[in-house]
Image (cartoon, grey):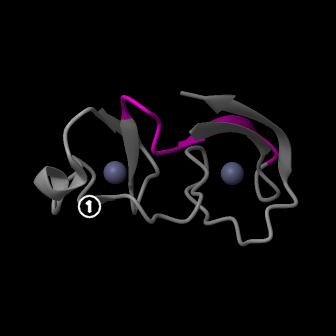
Amino acid sequence: MGCLYKIKCPNCGEDFEWNEGPGAIADVLHCDRCGKELWTTEPMMEFEYIQCPCGGTYDKEVPIICPHCHQELSKPRKYIKDAVLWD
Ligand SMILES: [Zn+2]
Ligand SMILES: [Zn+2]
């Protein structure tokens, strides 16, 4: 079961959404530098070391990164406004 978080960035005040997997069919990776999403239905092993155009690497265990100011948001995730589960 994946989860879609709706977040208000504490650094720049912008709203953004952040998906976390894995779901039943698809999983989601994030760039460790800019936070961009990459959806995949392939096994995770196939996706190691995939480069993002920004120079970062897509990974499963990426901290939440604001796509607007590129700041990492620390846990606990007190900035999450809402969370929606998906398959
Ligand atoms: Zn931000
Ligand atoms: Zn990137």
Q: Secondary structure at mark 1?
A: loop
Residue 4 position within the rendered picture, expressed as x and y whole percent measured from the top left: 65, 35
Residue 38 position within the rendered picture, expressed as x and y whole percent measured from the top left: 33, 38
- For image coordinates 24% across by 52% down, the residue present is 44
The stretch in magenta equals: 13-26
- For image coordinates 45% across by 44% down, the residue present is 22
Residue 87 position within the rendered picture, expressed as x and y whole percent measured from the top left: 53, 27
Q: On the picture, is 73 further left or further right than 13?
A: left
The residue carrying mark 1 is: 57
Which quadrant holds residue 83?
top right
Between 69 and 43, which is closer to the camera in this rendering?
A: 43
Quadrant in which the N terminus is drawn: top right
76 over 15 or under it: above or below: below
Q: Amino acid at mark 1?
A: Thr
49 over 34 or under it: above or below: below
Between 54 and 20, which is closer to the camera in this rendering?
A: 20
- For image coordinates 68% across by 32% down, the residue present is 85
Q: Is residue 53 visible?
A: yes
